[in-house]
């Protein structure tokens, strides 16, 4: 075909497709820019490393090995095939031309041929997993099928064009292009001129599929190809699960929290277009698994669809190109829906335990929890809408400094039960101490958690640690208030606590409560907790004191212990090893693991304020988690959080297993092994 004819058709078609692509991408960027400006990202070196690990190594995707490998093949296949597309398009425009790779060109052709074949295989496998194996986390609508057809179309057209080209150019089948050579047999009897015609036919098919795919990508879930790298790059660094404070001193604020899509930060809105609808988040969500309405994937996709509809209405830029092919209906109606209440319902919002399992599973770095808390903040602070039992708990916190509304003076009642020689001195002016033991509201008022506090005191006495407790002066950490959305109360409690820590010259804090640990360690710095104040979870110190020989467990325990990782200790703070080291150090303890442990541990159901709310939908999360623990036939379910202890203890009672299986904090198990020495 004459070159000028090819060019005369190629240039307008390609130019038009690039124009449509540009319009779609520009519309999404405009919608994202409706959000509040995000700070310029700090620590670029860390971010580039993280991006490289996520993209080149597929770190998160490979947690599901089969899907991860399939995606890895597609990713690297497409990287190679980008060059292949340039090579093929160039050959169609300038016969005789090819990529200027010199002596390496034959190797490139072989690589390209292999990549085409492997991507075809991976595409077939993706279709199998979605439509035959029917993997529960994957949607099975036509849109996902369209993408697979696009990819298959691209690969087949390359093979057919290259096969026809071999006959056209009079090349013999060779191992240098094994799959194209196989396909060339289809054109063997056609003669050179006809094979040349076939080459151009499949060349055009390839180009048109490629350009259609290019235009389709940003208006489908495959927008993740563009937005996921940006999202991973911009993702929070530092402690995951750290929430951003509200600036109550800002007099211009008309409302607090996220009441409309524009109240999200731009970096949070990028999450929405980065979502690939893989369902990994929903498949690990304890709320979804127990029949609640909440599905973290649908939370993200519903927010995305709302942003697209509202963005189109506000900017008057259509999100769909060409509109006749892609536009859905109801865009205007969608843009008018209330964000907290309609787009995301209260039932969904109040079902989240803030466990972060969804975030840990998400391959594109989406952060669900800060969005949920942002919406809760709006409901609580601006609208005063929250479950009645959560409201009562917050009033108790405000008035008495504990969730039950028990007397402030009763905070030390548990200390009266300490039998000499055990000692837990109170913080007093001029009396030095190394560690402040923050007992927490659970440890102070809850009978079961009090036994953990006593075990910790026993171990600190045993190890000869200098420590003190605040007693009635101690304040609630405010973590629950913050996760429920009452940021105002949280900040009040946080500032009171920080003032007390500073006034008493506290340098090291230890607590048995992972929620207090998380907020002290990662969030209190925003409210003035000095950087040199060290914060520890009790398991971190116990593991250290065991290593230093300050604690020597010498009593046989003879227990088969399954350890449940508390979300705020594990996923929020990466403390997985210390509790296990403690258990392994106890003579006679056999440590076993549930299928879901470590970073994939399932929540007990108490986080995010749900400890104080009724679970009205579906089955109980604590029952599901207890069942998982009991499946490995332990004699003890071990944990390191007073909330988990309550939930799992209730779970064993509900399953009538409490007679044969104890639920204990690791400090209690350890204290039992050193009891005779204290
Ligand atoms: S934080 Fe936990 S409960 Fe909330 S949506 Fe994510 S996985 Fe579900
Ligand atoms: S939010 Fe992440 S894990 Fe969930 S569906 Fe989207 S990409 Fe997958």
Image (tube, rainbow, N blue to C red):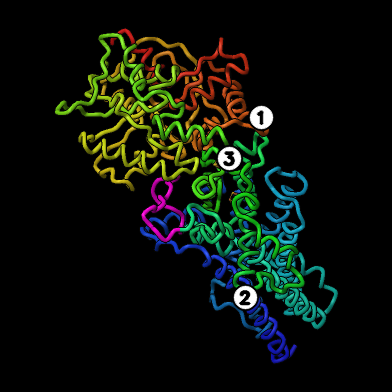
Residue at 36% over, 20% down: 410
Q: Nearer the viewer, mark 3 or mark 2?
A: 3
Q: Position of residue 59 (x, y in %)?
A: 51, 49
Q: Tag 2's secondary structure?
A: helix
Q: Is residue 653 visible?
A: yes
Residue wearing tag 3: 350
Q: Position of residue 480 (x, y in %)?
A: 46, 36
Disc ID at residue 619 = 1
Residue at 47% over, 62% down: 36
Q: Is residue 65 visible?
A: no
Q: Main secondary structure of the magenta part?
A: loop
**Does 167 sit left or right of 614 as displayed?**
right
Q: Residue furthest left?
A: 430
Front residue of this view, candidates 324 and 8: 324
Disc ID at residue 362 = none
Q: How many marks?
A: 3
Q: Looking at the image, is 594 positioned above or below residue 139?
A: above
Residue wearing tag 2: 23
Instruction: Report the Cα–Cα distance between label 3 and label 2.
Output: 38 Å
Residue count near mark 3 (Cα–Cα under 10 Å), binned few <14, some 14–19, many ≥20: many
Question: Which of disc 3 and disc 1 is earlier in sequence?
Answer: 3
**Which contiguous range is marked in magenta?**
234-253
> From the image, which quarter does the N terminus lie in?
bottom right
Where on the picture, by quarter, is residue 162? bottom right
Q: Position of residue 506 (x, y in %)?
A: 23, 34
Residue at 65% over, 62% down: 335
Front residue of this view, candidates 256 and 132: 256
Q: Nearer the viewer, mark 1 or mark 3?
A: 3
Instruction: Report the Cα–Cα distance between label 1 and label 2.
Output: 47 Å
Answer yes or no: disc 1 within 8 Å of ligand 1. no
Residue count near mark 1 (Cα–Cα under 10 Å), binned few <14, some 14–19, many ≥20: some
Q: Mark 3 and mark 1 in contact (Cβ < 8 Å)?
A: no
């Amino acid at each position: 075909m004459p070159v000028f004819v090819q060019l005369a058709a190629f240039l307008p078609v390609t130019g038009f497709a690039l124009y449509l692509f540009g319009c779609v991408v520009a519309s999404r960027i405009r919608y994202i820019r409706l959000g509040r400006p995000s700070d310029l990202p700090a620590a670029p070196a860390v971010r580039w490393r993280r991006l490289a690990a996520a993209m080149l190594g597929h770190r998160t995707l490979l947690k599901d090995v089969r899907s991860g490998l399939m995606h890895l093949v597609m990713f690297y296949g497409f990287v190679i095939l980008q060059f292949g597309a340039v090579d093929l398009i160039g050959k169609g425009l300038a016969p005789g031309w090819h990529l200027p790779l010199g002596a390496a060109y034959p190797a490139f052709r072989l690589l390209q041929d292999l990549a085409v074949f492997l991507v075809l295989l991976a595409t077939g496998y993706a279709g199998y997993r979605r439509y035959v194996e029917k993997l529960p986390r994957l949607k099975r609508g036509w849109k996902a099928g369209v993408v697979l057809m696009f990819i298959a179309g691209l690969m087949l057209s390359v093979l057919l064009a290259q096969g026809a080209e071999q006959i056209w150019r009079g090349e013999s089948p060779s191992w240098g292009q094994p799959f194209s050579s196989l396909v060339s047999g289809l054109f063997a009897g056609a003669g050179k001129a006809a094979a040349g015609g076939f080459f151009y036919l499949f060349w055009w098919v390839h180009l048109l599929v490629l350009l259609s795919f290019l235009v389709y990508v940003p208006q489908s879930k495959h927008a993740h190809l563009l937005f996921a790298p940006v999202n991973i790059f911009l993702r929070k660094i530092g402690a995951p699960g750290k929430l951003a404070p509200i600036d109550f001193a800002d007099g211009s604020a008309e409302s607090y929290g996220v009441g409309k899509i524009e109240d999200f930060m731009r970096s949070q809105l990028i999450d929405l277009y980065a979502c690939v609808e893989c369902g990994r988040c929903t498949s690990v969500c304890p709320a979804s698994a127990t029949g609640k309405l909440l599905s973290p994937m649908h939370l993200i996709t519903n927010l995305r669809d709302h942003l697209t509809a509202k963005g189109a209405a506000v900017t008057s830029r259509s999100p769909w190109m060409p509109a006749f092919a892609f536009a859905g209906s109801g865009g205007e109606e969608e843009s008018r829906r209330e964000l907290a209440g309609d787009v995301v319902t209260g039932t969904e919002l109040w079902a989240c335990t803030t466990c972060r399992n969804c975030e840990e599973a998400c391959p594109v770095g989406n952060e669900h929890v800060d969005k949920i808390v942002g919406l809760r903040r709006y409901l609580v602070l601006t609208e005063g809408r929250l479950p009645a039992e959560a409201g009562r708990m917050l009033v108790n916190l405000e008035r008495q400094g504990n969730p039950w509304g028990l007397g402030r003076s009763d905070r030390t009642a548990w200390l009266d039960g300490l039998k000499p020689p055990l000692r837990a001195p109170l913080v007093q002016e001029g009396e030095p101490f190394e560690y402040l033991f923050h007992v927490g509201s659970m440890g102070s008022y809850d009978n079961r958690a009090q036994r953990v506090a006593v075990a910790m005191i026993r171990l600190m006495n045993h190890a000869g640690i200098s420590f003190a407790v605040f007693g009635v002066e101690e304040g609630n950490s405010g973590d629950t208030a913050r996760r429920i959305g009452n940021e105002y109360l949280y900040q009040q409690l946080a500032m009171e606590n920080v003032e007390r820590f500073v006034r008493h010259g506290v340098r090291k804090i230890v607590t048995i409560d992972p929620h207090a640990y998380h907020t002290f360690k990662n969030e209190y710095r925003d409210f003035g907790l000095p950087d040199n104040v060290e914060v520890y979870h009790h398991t971190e110190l116990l593991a250290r004191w065991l290593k230093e020989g300050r604690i020597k467990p010498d009593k046989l325990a003879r227990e088969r212990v399954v350890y449940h990782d508390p979300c705020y200790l594990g996923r929020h703070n990466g403390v997985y090893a210390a509790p296990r080291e403690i258990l392994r150090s106890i003579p006679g303890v056999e440590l076993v693991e549930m299928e879901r442990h470590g970073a994939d541990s399932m929540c007990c159901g108490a986080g995010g304020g749900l400890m104080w709310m009724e679970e009205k939908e579906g089955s109980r999360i604590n029952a599901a988690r207890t069942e998982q623990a009991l499946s490995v036939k332990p004699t003890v379910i071990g944990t390191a959080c007073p909330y988990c202890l309550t939930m799992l203890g209730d779970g064993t009672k509900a399953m009538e297993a409490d007679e044969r299986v104890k639920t204990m904090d690791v400090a209690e198990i350890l204290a039992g092994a050193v009891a005779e020495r204290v």
